[in-house]
Image (cartoon, grey):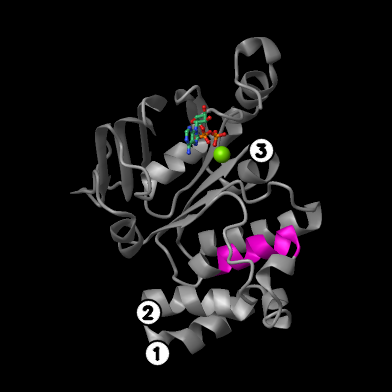
Amino acid sequence: MSEGALLELRDIEAGYGPFRALFGLSLSIEPGEAVALLGANGAGKTTLARVATGLVAPTAGEITIDGEDFTGAPAWRFARAGVAHAPEGRSVFASLTVAENLILSFHRRRGRQGVGAGLDQAYEIFPRLGERHDQMAGTLSGGEQRMLALARVLVESPRLLIADELSLGLAPIIVDEVYDKLSAIRQSGTAVLVVEQHVGHALELCDRVVLLDHGATGWEGPTDEAADVVVTQMFDTSGGGTRG
Ligand SMILES: Nc1ncnc2c1ncn2[C@@H]1O[C@H](COP(=O)(O)OP(=O)(O)O)[C@@H](O)[C@H]1O
Ligand SMILES: [Mg+2]
């Protein structure tokens, strides 16, 4: 175990009903650190992101935040402790406008008073959302929906942002824009755990790489030593990585 860890997962087992997705996984993130969590489809990355944000309770192992026990704690306690989750997929309310999506989120977290300031900040982070504030979220492009989902959590200035497959299905130019924002929040001192199947941007952003393989840590080390390992383990079809 590491002393000053912001978030620490120890010997985590987790799954869905009888199905087990994580097998004794340990991972720790220091304040301000940027970690890339890589791995083939089905390796357990999303499950780990859910465990680390309180959405899935582990069946064994321990979770601490700043050394305090969070094992089995509800998701809102993780959020309150500054651990934010940008989930995989299009996590917006399709039939509400951009502004309504943001208002709903800010109102819940900071009350009526904080809504106006939250909107201003969100539109400053992603000006495109301001331009489209009146548009139904369901009619936004995939990239804009991802910006909306990300704006909701970035405005809360989390201490740790866990971002799941931000680049999936997005045009390269949008991926660049989203990663520019991640880089900026990193520089402001926020720790990030970036879950990606597409590794280029994640490697550029992060100091450290954790490679998941069948629900356990396959490799862990500094980014500059990761390139070869990542290429062999993720793209070697004989290596046994599950493929979707
Ligand atoms: N909601 C769920 N119900 C049942 N099984 C799931 C669920 N989500 C993921 N799994 C299974 O857990 C394993 C790990 O999945 P996941 O964590 O989504 O991997 P990754 O994000 O690396 O692709 C996979 O075998 C997947 O089929
Ligand atoms: Mg996933």
Q: Which residue is mark 2?
A: 110
* Label 1–label 2 contact, CB within 8 A: yes
Q: Is residue 232 above or below residue 62?
A: above
The answer to whether residue 128 shows anywhere in this view is yes
Determine crowd level at label 3: few under 14, some 14-19, many 20+ residues with C-alpha closer than 10 A: some
Q: Which residue is mark 3?
A: 199
| Residue at mark 3 to residue at mark 1: CA–CA distance | 40 Å
Q: Is residue 145 magenta?
A: yes
* Label 2–label 3 contact, CB within 8 A: no
Closer-to-camera residue (187/49):
49
Nearest to the eye among marks 2 and 3: give it. Answer: 2
Q: Position of residue 216 (x, y in %)?
A: 43, 24
Q: Is residue 125 left or right of residue 31?
A: right
Residue interval drawn in magenta:
141-151
Q: Find numbered disc 3 in the image and state the secondary structure of the residue it sits on.
A: helix
Q: Residue at x 67, y 70 (%)?
A: 137
Point out which mark residue 113 bears.
Answer: 1
Q: Residue at x 75, y 59 (%)?
A: 174
| Residue at mark 2 to residue at mark 3: CA–CA distance | 35 Å
Q: Find numbered disc 2 in the image and state the secondary structure of the residue it sits on.
A: helix
Q: Is residue 99 above or below residue 55?
A: below
Callout 1 amino acid: Gln
| Residue at mark 1 to residue at mark 2: CA–CA distance | 7 Å
* Label 3–label 1 contact, CB within 8 A: no
Q: Is residue 65 left or right of residue 49?
A: left
Nearest to the eye among marks 3 and 1: give it. Answer: 1
Determine crowd level at label 1: few under 14, some 14-19, many 20+ residues with C-alpha closer than 10 A: few
Q: Residue at x 69, y 46 (%)?
A: 168
Q: Is residue 38 above or below residue 69?
A: above
